Image: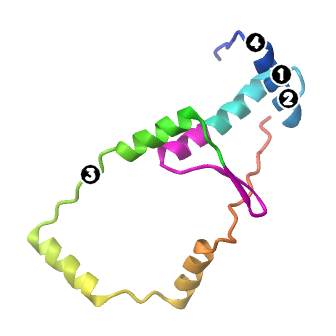
Amino acid sequence: MSRFQAQTNAVLDQELEELRKRLGLTPSQKADLLREVASLAAWIVRQAEAGRSVEARRGAEVETLTHPVIERLRARHETAVVPRVTLTDAEAERLARILDRGFEPTPALRAALQRLASPKRRPPKLRWKKTV
């Protein structure tokens, strides 16, 4: 197990202390605090790398999480080169035939897609498991 030390200032100490209290951790659980904060930060970074945004909602009010690091990651994602798909003539003809047939989804699939597209839909609540 590695050891971690950091020099902090009064503002950062206060932020960390407030986070520790909000997360229900005791003063001796600094490693747990670091693990929880790192876990949250890693998830946010993964979302930004995938080109997604993180939003906080309360009723009709929506606030998007912004930070220079998130903007850099999102910009890197947007400028990433998307690999091209090259089809042979036979594959292109087969794809054209499939697309010409059209698509008629089942009523159950239509209902599921409609629920996903609903502006009233809320993301699932995150639940943290305590690690012992």
Amino acid on which disc 1 is placed: Gln
Q: Marks 1 and 2: CB-CB under 8 Å?
A: yes
N-term-proximal mark, 4 vs 1: 4
Q: Which mark is residue 9?
A: 4
Amino acid on which disc 2 is placed: Glu
Q: Marks 4 and 1: CB-CB under 8 Å?
A: no
The residue shown at (83%, 21%) is 14
The residue shown at (26%, 51%) is 83
Q: Quadrant of residue 91?
A: bottom left
Q: Which mark is residue 14?
A: 1
Position of residue 68 measured from the top left corner of the image (x, y, whole percent): 55, 33
Q: Residues within 10 Å of mark 4 (few under 14, many from 20)?
A: few
| Mark 1 to mark 2 CA distance (whole Å) | 6 Å
| Mark 4 to mark 3 CA distance (whole Å) | 46 Å
Whether residue 72 is situated above or below residue 112 in the rendered picture: above
Q: Nearer the viewer, mark 3 or mark 1?
A: 1
* Residue position for label 2: 18
Query: The residue tagged with tag 1: helix, strand or loop?
Result: helix
Amino acid on which disc 4 is placed: Asn
* Residue position for label 3: 83
Q: Nearer the viewer, residue 127 or 65?
A: 65
Which residues are drawn in magenta?
Answer: 42-63
N-term-proximal mark, 4 vs 2: 4
The residue shown at (78%, 19%) is 11
Whether residue 2 is situated above or below residue 77 in the rendered picture: above
The residue shown at (80%, 34%) is 132
Q: Is residue 43 left or right of residue 13?
A: left
| Mark 4 to mark 2 CA distance (whole Å) | 14 Å
